[in-house]
Image (spheres, rainbow, N blue to C red):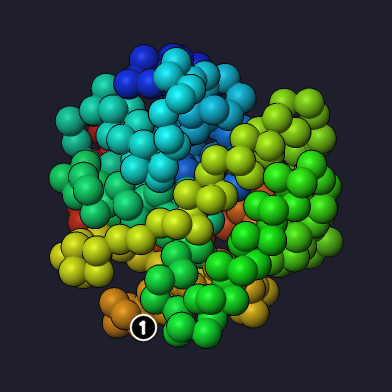
């Protein structure tokens, strides 16, 4: 499947828009921040030669509309959406790559629905619960500052603080890397993220024992230039807890956007090298 085909799926409380492209085993891409299905098109262009790519708009973003807007939007609501989406598409476990909040969703999904996951690559998940007490308190304060700036009516200030906390750098990039342009839809997505998903990330906690039980399916990743940033430090703390190594990817927290070709090449090589067995005839 060289073209990208769009679909919709009704799930409890929402109507999800999702896209499929490529050939090979299933690979679900989970975007960070306010990113929608277009957010990982840069790496999907290279990955589709090896995998059948699934990407989607999280509920409330872009073409994924809410049908029960009064429901509290927690990360577990999102991972239930992933469960329904994958159950709709396949009975086989899938590869998952998630970045930032997408990595956090991938971890929660793996803990709750391990039978649907073949392997998860979690790139800089902002999971603060394994930080030391001082760092965790500081992280919560910084996250609340972003949310408060938004609540006071300043999306621009909130975004500025968010960029600083995440350490996003758009100057260090591949020569032909393309960045998404500002649009009214992106502004709406950002507002929805700051109102709903950002607080859910800050409040999220998981059961450490349950995380250890699925550790064999988790591979942690971090950016080469994001070492001082919160999500990178969170990744280090998770790795120390699970006694796992971290794979370093090109760029920083947003390396999948700034270095899409190198990022996708490393991700494909990494997934294809794992001794889990891949049926090259699957899904086309």
Q: Nearer the viewer, residue 168 or 94?
A: 168
User: Quarter of the image containing the C terminus?
Assistant: top left
Q: Residue at x 19, y 63 (%)?
A: 210
Does the image show residue 17? no
Residue at mark 1 = 240
* Quarter holding residue 127: bottom left
Q: Nearer the viewer, residue 213 or 119?
A: 213
* Quarter holding residue 83: top left
Q: Is residue 82 above or below residue 270?
A: above
Which residue sits furthest front?
A: 152
Q: Is residue 35 above or below residue 252?
A: above
Q: Residues within 10 Å of mark 1 (few under 14, many from 20)?
A: few
Q: Is residue 195 above or below residue 233?
A: above
* Quarter holding residue 274: bottom left
Q: Residue at x 25, y 69 (%)?
A: 208
Q: Residue at x 80, y 29 (%)?
A: 183
Left or right, 151 with respect to 238, comes to: right
Left or right, 67 with respect to 169, comes to: left
């Amino acid at each position: 499947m060289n073209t990208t085909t769009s679909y919709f799926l009704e799930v409890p409380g929402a109507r999800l828009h999702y896209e499929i492209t490529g050939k090979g085993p299933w690979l679900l891409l989970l975007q960070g921040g306010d990113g929608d299905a277009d957010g990982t098109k840069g790496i999907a262009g290279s990955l589709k030669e090896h995998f059948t790519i699934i990407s989607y708009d999280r509920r409330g973003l872009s073409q994924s509309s809410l049908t029960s807007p009064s429901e509290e939007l927690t990360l577990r609501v999102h991972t239930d959406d992933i469960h329904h989406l994958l159950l709709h598409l396949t009975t086989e476990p899938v590869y998952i790559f998630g970045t930032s909040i997408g990595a956090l969703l991938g971890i929660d999904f793996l803990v709750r629905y391990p039978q649907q996951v073949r392997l998860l690559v979690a790139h800089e998940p902002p999971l603060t619960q394994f930080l030391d007490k001082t760092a965790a308190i500081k992280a919560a304060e910084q996250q609340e500052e972003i949310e408060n700036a938004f609540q006071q009516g300043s999306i621009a200030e909130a975004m500025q603080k968010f960029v600083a906390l995440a350490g996003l750098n758009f100057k260090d990039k591949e020569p032909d890397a393309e960045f998404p342009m500002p649009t009214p839809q992106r502004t709406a997505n950002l507002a929805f993220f700051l109102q709903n998903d950002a607080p859910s990330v800050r409040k999220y906690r998981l059961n450490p024992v349950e995380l250890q039980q699925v550790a064999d399916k988790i591979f942690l990743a971090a950016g080469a230039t994001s070492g001082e940033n919160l999500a990178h430090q969170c990744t280090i703390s998770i790795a120390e807890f699970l006694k796992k190594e971290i794979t370093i990817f090109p760029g920083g927290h947003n390396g999948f956007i700034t270095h899409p070709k190198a990022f996708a090449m490393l991700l494909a090589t990494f997934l294809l090298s794992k001794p889990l067995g891949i049926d090259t005839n699957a899904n086309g």
